Structure formats: C-alpha cells, structure tokens
Image (tube, grey):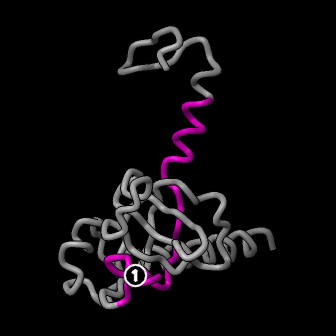
C-alpha cells in the first residue's frame, strides 16, 4: 500500500512538473526592451519577462527599471493585468518574473503604457530566496567568498 501511494504521489508531482515545464517552454523569453521596441513582433504571443512591478490604483505596471517608475516614465512600462489569486504584497515594488500573453494594441489606463501583459501568471521575485540566504550569512561570523573565508564579508 505504501509503495502504491508513493508511486501515485511521485506520478502526480512528475505530471505537475512536466505541465509547468511545457507551459514555460511554450512562452518566449524576451526582454522589456524587445517588447517596447518591437511590440508587433510579440502581439498575442505567450511571453516571459522580468521587470520592476508596481501595483497601485489605475497603475498596475511592469517597468523596465525602478527609476522609470520613480520618474513616471510610463512608456518604459507595460500595463499588467494582475491575477486576483496572487498575493500582491509579496511582489509589489520588486523585480519579478512574469509569464503571460502580450497585447501590443492595449495600452492600459489612459493609453499611457507601451502594451499590456494579460493572463499574467507565475509572478515571483527570483531574488527573494537569495536575500534570505544573504541574511543568514550576515548572522554568522565568517562567510565564504570565492573559496576564501573572510570575517563578516557582507
């Protein structure tokens, strides 16, 4: 019985991993610059992109850089249809990885943005785990840097 249960769990986990992998392989990995410069090339396509995410009233957008948000450079941003099932507090104000469908002819609130990412999914901040790791290193007396142990190197 335990063997059967283990096989069932392993099969389910494997199927989930394969479906996630297939979804990410079908989406084209692009840069914000590519989407802004040649929007017609990616219109209606599944894309993966990294940018600075801001979620606010009438201003949900993925920016090329944090400074573009700070200075209100909306043309360096894409409107994002943020999924309601995601916790925005975890990703708001961070550089995030986004997978979704690019819409070149939709420009968000007041047509300010250079396009729209609809059906946004897989929003996550890839550097969060790294920050946790660095915080743990700071708590120790020594850390490893290029195979050399230094006192309080960070």
Q: Depth check: give the residue in front, 40 or 14.
A: 40
Q: Which residue is drawn at 60% across and 30% down?
A: 135
139 shown above or below 9? above
Q: Mark 1 points at which residue?
A: 116
Where is residue 128? Give x, y as percent: 55, 47
In the rendered view of the protein, which quadrant contains the N terminus?
Answer: bottom right
**Residue 15 horizontal side relative to residue 148, left or right:** right
Q: Which residue is drawn at 43% across and 83% down?
A: 110
**Residue 64 horizontal side relative to residue 136, left or right:** left
- In the image, which residues are magenta? 106-135
Where is residue 75? Give x, y as percent: 31, 70
Q: Farthest residue in the top direction?
A: 151
147 shown above or below 99? above
**Residue 65 horizontal side relative to residue 88, left or right:** left
Quadrant for residue 86, please give it: bottom right
Q: Residue at x 25, y 73 (%)?
A: 36
Tally the marks. Answer: 1
**Residue 79 horizontal side relative to residue 89, left or right:** left
Dot 1 alpha-carbon crowd within 10 angstroms: few under 14, some 14 to 19, many 20 or more:
many
Where is residue 21? Give x, y as percent: 44, 73
Q: Farthest residue in the right direction?
A: 1
């Amino acid at each position: 019985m335990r063997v059967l249960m283990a096989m069932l769990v392993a099969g389910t986990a494997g199927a989930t991993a394969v479906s996630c992998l297939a979804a990410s392989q079908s989406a084209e990995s692009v840069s914000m610059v590519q989407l802004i410069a040649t929007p017609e090339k990616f219109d209606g396509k599944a894309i993966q992109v990294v940018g600075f995410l801001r979620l606010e009233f009438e201003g949900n957008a993925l920016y090329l850089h944090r400074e573009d948000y700070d200075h209100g450079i909306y043309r360096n941003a894409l409107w994002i249809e943020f999924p309601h099932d995601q916790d925005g507090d975890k990703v708001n104000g961070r550089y995030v990885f986004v997978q979704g469908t690019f819409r070149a002819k939709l420009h968000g609130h007041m047509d300010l943005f250079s396009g729209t990412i609809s059906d946004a999914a897989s929003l996550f901040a890839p550097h969060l785990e790294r920050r946790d790791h660095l915080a743990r290193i700071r708590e120790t007396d020594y850390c490893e840097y290029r195979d050399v142990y230094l006192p309080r190197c960070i």
